Image (cartoon, grey):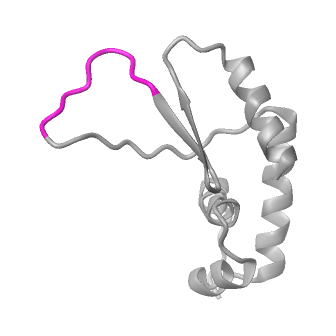
Amino acid sequence: MAKHGRREYWARLVAELEAGASVADVAKRHQVKEGTLKWWRTQIRREIREGGRLLPVVQRSEPGVQARGAAAIEIRVGSLSLHVEPGTDERYVAALLSAVRNAC
C-alpha cells in the first residue's frame, strides 16, 4: 500500500466519491485504505463548508474552436449540471453550490 500525503491527490479521489463512486471501489482502484479515504473526504468537506478549497478543473473545447476572453463554465455535482456565465458573483455561485450539496 503506497503512502500519499499530497492534498491534491486526495482531493481527486474525493471528487470521484462526490461524483458517485463508492468508497470501497475508489480505495481499491487507488490502493489506499478505506478509512484514510473517508478521513480525507471529511477533511475536504470541512474545507468546503469553511469556503477555502480549490476545485479540480477539466478544460474541454470543441475541435477547431479557439477560446476568446472569458468563457462560461459548467459545474457538475453528481447528475446536476450548472452553467455559470462570466461575471457571475462568486458568492452567489458558492451559495448555490452549498444549497445543492445540502439538498443531496
Q: Is residue 30 above or below residue 4?
A: below
Q: Nearer the viewer, residue 58 or 82?
A: 82
Percent x, y of residue 83: 53, 31
Left or right of 13 in this view: 24: right
Q: Which residue shows up at 64% across the image and 78% down it?
A: 26
Is 78 situated above or below 48? Answer: below
Left or right: where does residue 1 sit relative to residue 45?
left
Vertical relation: 58 (above or below) 84: below
Residue name at image x 85 percent, y 66 percent: 39
Query: Residue 73 colored magenta?
Result: no
Q: Nearer the viewer, residue 50 or 90?
A: 90
- Answer whether residue 71 is magenta in the image: yes
Q: Quadrant of the N terminus?
A: bottom right
Image side of residue 8 versus residue 34, left or right: left
Residue 14: x percent and y percent?
69, 62
Label the magenta part by its dominant secondary structure: loop
Question: Which percent across, then down, holds residue 20?
Answer: 67, 67
Task: Estimate the x, y position of residue 65 in percent, counting from the top left.
Answer: 18, 32
- At x 79% / y 61%, what residue is drawn? 41
> From the viewer's perspective, is residue 6 above or below residue 86?
below
Which span of residues is magenta-colored?
Answer: 64-72
**Total count of labels:** 0
* Residue at 66% from the left image edge and 62% from the top image edge: 10
Q: Tell me which corner region of the image, top left, top right, bottom left or bottom right, holds residue 6.
A: bottom right
